[in-house]
Amino acid sequence: MTGKAAADTAGRPTVAIVGCGRIARVHAANLAPHARLAFTSRRPESARALAARFSGEALAGFEEAVERPDIAAVAICSPLEHHAAQTVAALEAAKSVLVEKPMAQSRAEVEAIGQALIGRPPGSLTVAENYLYKPSLDRLRAWLPDIGPLRRVRVSKLTRQQPSDWRAEHGALLEGGIHFVALLGAIAGAEPEAVRADFPGGGEPERHAHLELEYPSGTRAEVRYGWDTPSLPGGILQHSFVEGEDGRLVFESNGLYLWSRAWSGFRLRAGPFADLMGFGAMARDFLRSVRNPALRPRSDFETARRDLEIVFRAYDTR
Ligand SMILES: NC(=O)c1ccc[n+]([C@@H]2O[C@H](COP(=O)([O-])OP(=O)(O)OC[C@H]3O[C@@H](n4cnc5c(N)ncnc54)[C@H](OP(=O)(O)O)[C@@H]3O)[C@@H](O)[C@H]2O)c1
């Protein structure tokens, strides 16, 4: 234990990044202008490399991140199988937590995180669901009133991926499709009444998922997500749509452009391209909750719980 304060003289909190791989570099780049960074990973050399790159500190291990009082927050960027245990440990040490998506791999793990949050302020946990922070989602939601009451939504992305690392152990729907389930949740809102699922190609863990959902309002929705389909790089130029009683919105599934055809006319907009993936907005929202834990982040536990429950209901149908 040290006697250091949880923020420096410039008021910047210290954030410990746990797991120093691909996404850790993205979070470090977005957090570095506003926070002091510390790093820990399975291999000390991974932590040392990012510490050198972002003028931060390499920690001795995860325990140091949760035990040191000068560390205000922890950003969990490890593989999925570690998310829940590390999140619970960090919350129990009264740290603010950013956990990568999906926050958990089972209902029991979701429950454990929920238990650890009891009695803690609403800003204690941000789930790194960057699709909720994409500027293209804000534009889409601003245009929704043009098309009237929602009737049908389809979100879709089919790519070719053959994971050879820890991802090979997890289903495509849970590991990657969760982004599109979250996107659908942000458009359709409520919890669905019915979830039907089909896993084309079979196999467990699945490499392709097709979900059909029905909402209490009568809105129907589909999620199509796969790692088994040849595509353009990044799965670009695939389309999703939202249909209402008065018109239709069509968007490039990554958010590259959006058009609407409604009684009010036709509109087409590209982008916005600044912070296309929403990581910058997400980092700012997280740090807002770190500084003032009374502020609930846009991507909170309840939103992530609702989205994961759709994934688990889809798996229940197997
Ligand atoms: N929001 C998004 O768009 C997005 C994009 C990509 C990934 N992600 C999510 O971010 C997480 C990490 O993905 P990634 O692509 O960054 O994977 P990655 O490149 O494999 O990095 C994971 C890192 O965690 C380290 N690690 C492994 N076990 C650990 C443990 N027990 N404690 C601490 N660190 C451990 C690894 O080890 P070493 O120390 O051996 O290097 C590796 O550096 C996943 O949940 C993934 O779904 C989200």
Image (cartoon, rainbow, N blue to C red):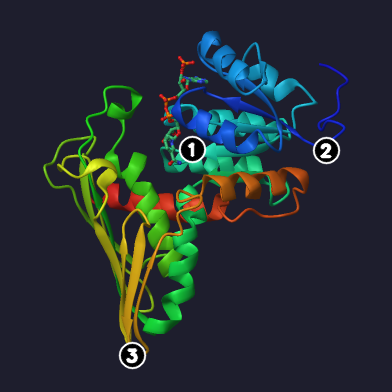
Q: Which residue is mark 3?
A: 263
Give the residue displayed 62% in from the left and 24% down from the top: 54
Asked whether the viewer can see residue 212, the reply is no
Closer-to-camera residue (51/183): 51
**Residue type highlighted by circle 1:** Glu
Up-down: is 166 above or below 263? above
Foreground mark, 1 or 3, reads: 3
Callout 2 environment at 10 Å: few (<14), some (14 to 19), or many (20+)?
A: few
Q: Secondary structure at mark 2?
A: loop
Whereabouts is ligand 1, in terms of quadrant?
top left
Q: CA distance from mark 1 to mark 3?
A: 46 Å
Q: Secondary structure at mark 3?
A: loop
The residue positioned farthest toward the bottom in the image shown: 263
Callout 1 environment at 10 Å: few (<14), some (14 to 19), or many (20+)?
A: some
Precedes in sequence: disc 1 or disc 3: 1
**Residue type highlighted by circle 3:** Trp
Q: Which mark is residue 109?
A: 1
Q: Pointer 1 and pointer 3: residues touching (CB < 8 Å)?
A: no
Precedes in sequence: disc 2 or disc 3: 2
Callout 3 environment at 10 Å: few (<14), some (14 to 19), or many (20+)?
A: few
- For this view, does 55 lie left or right of residue 310? right
The reply to whether the residue tagged 2 has its Cβ within 8 angstroms of ligand 1 is no
The reply to whether the residue tagged 3 has its Cβ within 8 angstroms of ligand 1 is no
Foreground mark, 2 or 1, reads: 2
- For this view, does 158 lie left or right of residue 194? left
Closer-to-camera residue (258/39): 258
Q: Which residue is mark 2?
A: 11
Q: CA distance from mark 2 to mark 3?
A: 51 Å
User: Residue 250: x, y in percent?
Assistant: 30, 69
**Residue type highlighted by circle 2:** Gly
User: Residue 102: x, y in percent?
Assistant: 44, 41
